[in-house]
Amino acid sequence: MSRKIGIIGSGPVGRVLAEGFLRHGYDVMIGSREPSKLQEWQQNTGGKAQSGTFEDVAAFGELLVLAVKGSAAKNALEMAGANNLNGKTIIDTTNPIADMAPDNGVLHFFTDLDHSLMEQLQAAFPDAHFVKAFNSIGNAYMVNPDFQGQQPTMFICGNSTQAKHDVTQVLQQFGHDVADMGGVEAARAIEPLCMLWCIPGFLQNEWSHAFRLLRA
């Protein structure tokens, strides 16, 4: 299992996941368009994490995490450099959220139900192994969440069996029950789970929940 983790993106999701990987003993580098703004965050981790540009991070990581706005995802990967992505597993946390206010609590996407953002990224970087994960739960519950002893379900998909195996190991360490939904096309169904997850938040300011798949 890869122990060097590169986090492309330094917003709340990127920082929460970086801290989670650190707690589980991984070597972590987090990337930003402006690495200097991460100095205080690095100090708060006791200097355990490294920081750099997206290119630095992609070169460092054996396993990568894409944690930027969906609208910025392709550009962030271009800045990381295709050569640094080739052959690597990329945990894709992104959602194609449009820059529009929710409609009665329902987010707008810039994709449709026949085209997911993950498919666009996989097509743009065909030699990388994308695995959708962490896109349908709040960042407060991404790492070892406590739902009264119940594990939330993390729905994943991707074309590489080995990449999904590696990501499943991470998700299990992070306290999630994993449900593999198949190939990259399944992102058409997984990405809209973000919409569903957000509705109680926008309508009732309730953000403390997660999905669970029940199996007979």
Image (cartoon, helix red, strand yellow):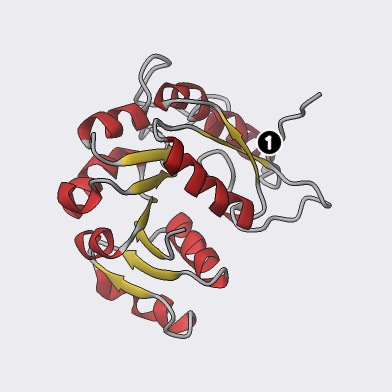
Q: In the image, what residue type sits under mark 1?
A: Phe
- Would residue 42 appear left or right of 58 to someone viewing this image? right
Please provide percent x and percent y for residue 13: 47, 55
Q: Which of 170 and 197 is in front in this view?
A: 170
Residue 132, by quadrant, is top left
Please provide percent x and percent y for residue 83: 16, 50
77 versus 192 height, above or below: below
30 versus 192 height, above or below: below
The residue shown at (34%, 59%) is 62
Please provide percent x and percent y for residue 203: 65, 34
Q: Is mark 1 on a helix, strand or loop?
A: loop
The residue shown at (48%, 30%) is 191
Residue 173, by quadrant, is bottom right
- Quadrant the C terminus occupies: top right
Q: Mark 1 points at which residue?
A: 211
Residue 132 seen by the camera: no
- Would residue 27 appear left or right of 56 to someone viewing this image? right
94 versus 43 height, above or below: above
Q: Nearer the viewer, residue 108 or 17?
A: 17
Q: Which of 4 and 204 is in front in this view?
A: 4
How many numbered discs sit on the rendered protein?
A: 1
The residue shown at (50%, 40%) is 135
- Would residue 125 appear left or right of 117 to someone viewing this image? left
The residue shown at (20%, 54%) is 84
Residue 1 seen by the camera: yes
Work out which residue is located at the far top of the displayed protein and give it. 114
Please provide percent x and percent y for residue 27: 42, 71
Label 1 crowd (10 A; few <14 / some 14-19 / many >=20): some
